[in-house]
Image (cartoon, helix red, strand yellow):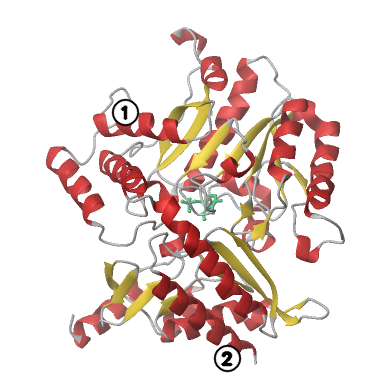
Amino acid sequence: MNASMIRRLEKWDKDFVWHPFTQMKEWREDPMVIIERGEGNTLIDAYGRRYIDGVSSLWCNVHGHCVPAIDRAIRGQLKRMAHSTFLGLSHEPAIRLSRKLLRLVPKGLSKAFYSDSGSAAVEAALKMAYQYWRHRGRFKKTKFLKLRNAYHGDTLGAVSVGGIELFHEIYRPLLFETFDAAAPYFYRDSFRGTEGGYARFCAKKVEAVLKKHHSEIAALVMEPVMQGAAGMLKHPRGYLFLLRRLTRKYGVLLIADEVATGFGRTGKMFACEHEEVTPDFLCLAKGITAGYLPLSATLTTDEVYRAFLGRYDEFKAFFHGHTYTANPLACAAAIANLELFEREKTLERLRPKIDLLSQELEEVKKLRHAGDVRQAGFMAGIELVKDRATKEPYPLREKKGHGTALRARAKGVLIRPLGNVVVLMPPLSIHPRELRTLCRVVRESIEEETE
Ligand SMILES: Cc1ncc(COP(=O)(O)O)c(C=O)c1O
């Protein structure tokens, strides 16, 4: 693309576009990067500058960009049809995907409901859980229990079960009431002891709420193993297992939001597998299409599904769905994604790369302002602090995470921080050489930004 065309596009962007989670005043003042192409684990901008995709295009890319098998699957489907409604009709890609997906997920999940974003997958789970209890005659079970700091998306239901003050507080008057419990955050918690002890300590906080309010609670919503947007907060081993036990004990459904953790990010296909847990709902999105097209799924059990069955005039149907529910192109991409996992043994090949990431993070831990470094498989967060001894955080206005990302970008690496937490979540396909470069650049960028 020539320079004058790029400048025109930049102007049109500023004239006509509103970007998500972006202070547009700053956006208009800052230099803009217009991405034109993808190649493997690299994105290439309109000037031809190359960047390692260090956060998988916001946590969704799995096998890299322009993967021939996925491109082919989408083109093949495109020759037949781009879209047909899923309301009152069906189609082969969604049927095949459902069968394939349900064979992969924790045992006991048997039905797939489709939407088109992670937020929408969570909304569907919330509404299903609420409606399930109504069909069971438990009319008081209308509330949800969430973990503090949680992030489950931006639609109002998902925001209601979210707890990130910075994003969510302003919408509070629009939201439904929830119960909450402190989430594990070992680095800033008072607990000192073993990992198992910490899991029990945190589970007790959840139990205290369940004990008191279980008759009003429809479901507990949580991200298993790693709370992503909360700041890459890793849960202690055993915590998920304990919460599953508690939700069973108190008759509360468990919604596992694996929008971020699903499809290999934690080293297993789904994070729930680490603790052999089957939730009542499993929410999937992002990596479901390998980061190609918008698709999400809310998977549930026969027990839940059956509660919605009845005569038409009992009006027990799930009155919910979107125009692009189960879009065939997206389903074709998702099938190709799952086939690639099998054919390329993606998870097996990931293991040494997870070890390499751990080694590289050891170097990051030595930095003067790296307060805590957290990793679950191929998800990592580096919490920058002003003072390591006191754990004093940087004031948000200093934008240390953002500053680090800008420096990394100038060195050919794209990352996007969460406040003061620098996030690394590369595509599973990243080459060890690229992974080393990614970590080196991030380390140098942190050093420059914080010294
Ligand atoms: C755990 C989790 N749930 C839900 C969402 C929302 O997904 P989407 O942005 O596709 O609506 C996200 C997005 O980052 C997420 O990380």
The one of 434 and 154 positioned closer to us in this rendering:
434
Toward the viewer: 264 or 305?
A: 264
Residue 107 location, x and y as percent? Answer: 53, 29
Query: Pointer 1: residues within 10 angstroms few (<14), some, or many (20+)?
Result: some
Left or right, 223 with respect to 293, comes to right
- Disc nearer the start of the sequence (2/1): 1
**Disc 2 vs disc 1: Cβ atoms closer than 8 Å?**
no
Where's residue 242, x and y in %?
75, 38
Residue name at image x 39 percent, y 36 percent: 322
Where disc 2 sits, the SS reads: helix
Q: Residue under label 2, please give it.
A: 448
Measured from the top left, where is residue 284 in percent x and y? Answer: 48, 43
For the residue with label 2, is its CB less than 8 Å from the closest atom of ligand 1? Answer: no
In the picture shown, does residue 56 fall above or below 422? above
Q: Quick check: 190 above or below 7?
A: above
Residue sitting nearer the eye, 309 or 24: 309
Instruction: Please give the name of the residue rendered at 56% of the width and 33% of the height, measured from the top-left corner.
Output: 281
Residue designated by label 1 = 95
Nearest the eye: 303 or 234: 234
The single residue placed furthest to the left in the displayed view is 79
Please tell me how crowded label 2 is: few (under 14), some (14-19), or many (20+) other residues with Cα within 10 Å: few
Quarter of the picture holding the C terminus: bottom right
Q: Is residue 107 left or right of residue 98?
A: right
